[in-house]
Image (cartoon, rainbow, N blue to C red):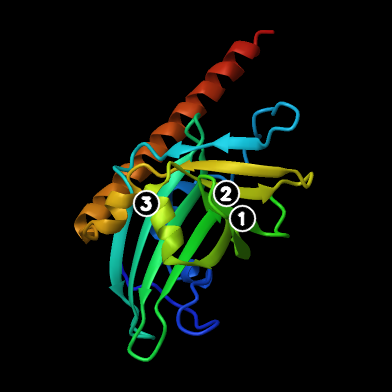
Amino acid sequence: MSFPARIARKRGLGFVTALAVAAGALAPLAASAQTAPAPAPAPQAPQPGQPNVVPVVPEPSQTGWTKLCGQDQASGAEICYTTRDFVSDQGQPVLAVAIYDIDAPEGQEDQLVARFLMPLGLLLQPGIRFAADQNAATNGAYAVCFPNGCFAEAQITQQMVDQMKAGANLNISVQNQNAQVVTFQVPLTGFTAGWDGDPIDPAELEAQQRRLQEELQRRSEELRQRLEQESGAAAPQ
């Protein structure tokens, strides 16, 4: 898979925009959403006074957080991003997270950027808020939407990265179509190893993507067969 990522210049060097997705720079990030678009899953009914929380789990065909590195030809920036996809407990794609470390050329400011591929069916305003565990939340804004989801992003600090490395969950809060706050609870297990570790070899990345695509095809075939069986069982009635 080709890299470098396309970086659009906004607010100085490389404020990562969703235009990068159109160029294929974030294929690992969006891979699990290549099936039919899925709306935001319904949260469990909360007790009075309790928040709406939607737990998600790592995409099972991925071995862990994946780190990719390369150089942006346009800006000369050295870019690494650490990413992972997450699904519902039924295995349906929900969201993906990518944390960028942008090492700018001399004379320009390095940046850390958090980017999220969020499900459809959420209010774009007032954006998102995210925090590791109970730490102070960071505000993020939606950048662009595609048929498989909407991208939100924010510049973050090293403190935020350290909190993610030490944390148990990344809590991403949004508003649904009823203007109710919903919080996706993303497990951070393995994030430190991915962030601090070596970037993945392109051949291994290709193998991961192939396994992921095979898994998605398998699930699609199982769903098709189940629907045919249910249709056949209902026909005599």
The answer to whether marks 3 and 1 mark residues whose Cβ atoms lie closer than 8 Å is no
Q: Secondary structure at mark 3?
A: helix
Asked if the residues shown at circle 1 and circle 2 are in contact, with their CB atoms under 8 angstroms apart, the answer is yes
Q: Which residue is mark 2?
A: 172
Amino acid at dot 2: Ile
Q: Which residue is mark 3?
A: 165
- Give the farthest residue toward the top: 237
Q: Relative to residue 94, is residue 49 depicted above or below?
A: above
Whether residue 199 sits left or right of residue 126 in the image: it is left
The residue that appears at 64% across and 13% down in the rendered structure is: 234
Distance in Å between CA atoms under marks 2 and 3? 16 Å
Mark 2 secondary-structure assignment: strand
Left or right for 19, reference 208: right
Q: 204 and 154: which one is in front?
A: 154
Position of the C terminus, as image quadrant, is top right
| Residue that numbered label 1 is attached to | 129
Indicate the amino acid at tag 3: Lys
Quarter of the figure with residue 228? top right
Q: Position of residue 32 (x, y in %)?
A: 45, 47
